[in-house]
Amino acid sequence: MITEGDVIGLLTQAITTVILCAAPMLIVAMVVGLIVSIFQATTQINEQTLAFVPKIVCVLLTLLLFAGYIFSMVGGFVARLFESINTISIS
């Protein structure tokens, strides 16, 4: 029978996997946003697209760079999830 501990353990692993997979893109977006904000404050340019376009480009490049890491993290989680199906009995 599936217990609360099993469900909480699976949810904890899922949330941890999501955070670890999203962290590189979020960190790059924050750093690029900070750099662009400092640039805008120094030059007094208040263009909205100036902050948006570099973030998108850098996040996409980071996604390409970390695609293998993200794939291995998600693949590992799914493998652990399928392995745990044998140990959990629903009755």
Image (cartoon, helix red, strand yellow):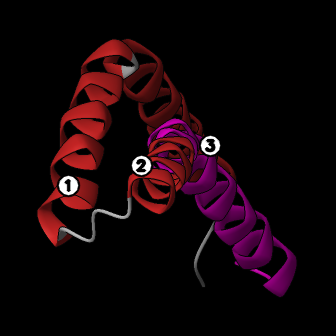
- In the rendered view, tell whether residue 36 sits above or below residue 2: above
Cα separation, mark 1 vs mark 2, equals 7 Å
- In the rendered view, tell whether residue 91 sits above or below residue 83: below
Q: Quadrant of the N terminus?
A: bottom right
Percent from the top left, x then y, of residue 34? Answer: 55, 52
- Residue drawn at the location 78% of the way across and 65% of the way down: 9
Magenta span: helix, strand or loop, mainly? helix
- Residue drawn at the location 37% of the way across and 64% of the way down: 44
Q: Which of marks 1 and 3 is in front?
A: 1
Look at the numbered disc 2 and give the secondary structure of its residue.
Answer: helix
Magenta-tinted stretch = 1-29
Q: Which amino acid does label 1 sit on?
A: Leu
- The residue that mark 2 highlights is 36
Question: In the drawing, does residue 36 fall left or right of residue 60?
Answer: right
Q: What residue type is labelled 3?
A: Leu
N-term mark: 1 or 3: 3
Question: In the drawing, does residue 33 fall left or right of residue 60?
Answer: right
N-term mark: 2 or 3: 3
- The residue that mark 1 highlights is 50
- In the rendered view, tell whether residue 45 sits above or below residue 43: below
Q: How crowded is mark 3: few (under 14 residues within 10 Å), some or many (20 or more)?
A: some
Cα separation, mark 1 vs mark 3, equals 28 Å
Q: Which amino acid does label 2 sit on?
A: Val
- The residue that mark 3 highlights is 20
Percent from the top left, x then y, of residue 90? Answer: 58, 78
Whether the residues at callouts 1 and 2 have beta carbons within 8 Å, the answer is yes
